[in-house]
Amino acid sequence: MSAFAVVPGRRWGPGWWWSATTGGHVVHGSAVMRDRLMFLDRDPRVVGLAGRPVRLVWRDAADGRVRSWVPQVFARYADGTALLADCPGSPGAGGVRALRAGGVVAAACEAVGWSYRRLEPPDPVLVANVRWLAGYRHPRHRGSPAVEAAVMDAFARARPLIEGVRAVGDPIVVWPVVFHALWSGRLSVVLSRPLHERVPAWAGPGVEAVVGAAAEGGVSW
């Protein structure tokens, strides 16, 4: 793993994301990268995550110079495929050098059956909602089997979150279980809208799954 540099004067430095997927910490170098790790961590297809896992080195065909690039994120999927990605803060971040490097990385990924993307910042409302749910991603919030089963029964049909929570029991006990179920996708809401207690939720995937898939998007090479 290639380390993230600490630059004096920057308002954001490297940090660690605790991954529900791996049960360990994944390094990140920016808020945008952290948010992208968060979305990948929530994707049920992802079985492995790493930050800056590999450095690609090649000779530029145009001028013969040796160049290199370190993609920011690696994700391994259950089907054996993988994703290398960069997490720019804006569409043009990194300039021409980043775009050219992305083309080289994409070609290398294609040769081994992987993919490469520039994952630009997703919608702020979506980020805020998933960030809230991420606070309940640890398995300890899943609750007892009895409470978990009651929560799923309560939302067998779509209903406002607060109504389902009150139907199960003590909100202090039930809310963490509901939020964990929303994080894991066992319950669904429309996350493209502000999350609040009157938002309809239901058991199983639905519109929210489509929204989550869109959040993975970016510039595909």
Image (tube, helix red, strand yellow):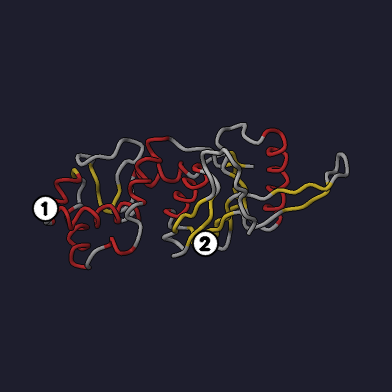
Residue 166 percent coordinates (x, y)? 12, 51
Q: Residue at x 16, y 51 (%)?
A: 165
**Label drawn at residue 48:** 2
Three-letter amino acid code at the position of disc 2: Gly
Q: Are marks 1 and 2 in contact (CB under 8 Å)?
A: no
Q: Is residue 32 left or right of residue 200?
A: right
Q: Is residue 108 left or right of residue 88?
A: right
Spatial CA span between label 1 and label 2:
37 Å
Question: Which quadrant would residue 173 be assigned to in this image?
Answer: bottom left
N-terminal of the pair, mark 1 or mark 2, is: 2
Answer few, some or many: residues within 10 Å of disc 2's Cα (few below 14, many 20 plus, some between 14 and 19).
Answer: some
Secondary structure beneath dot 1 equals helix
Q: Residue at x 22, y 62 (%)?
A: 148
Front-most of residues 95 and 43: 95
Three-letter amino acid code at the position of disc 1: Ala
User: Relative to 54, does residue 6 appear above or below in the rendering?
Assistant: above
**Label drawn at residue 167:** 1
Q: Residue at x 57, y 63 (%)?
A: 80
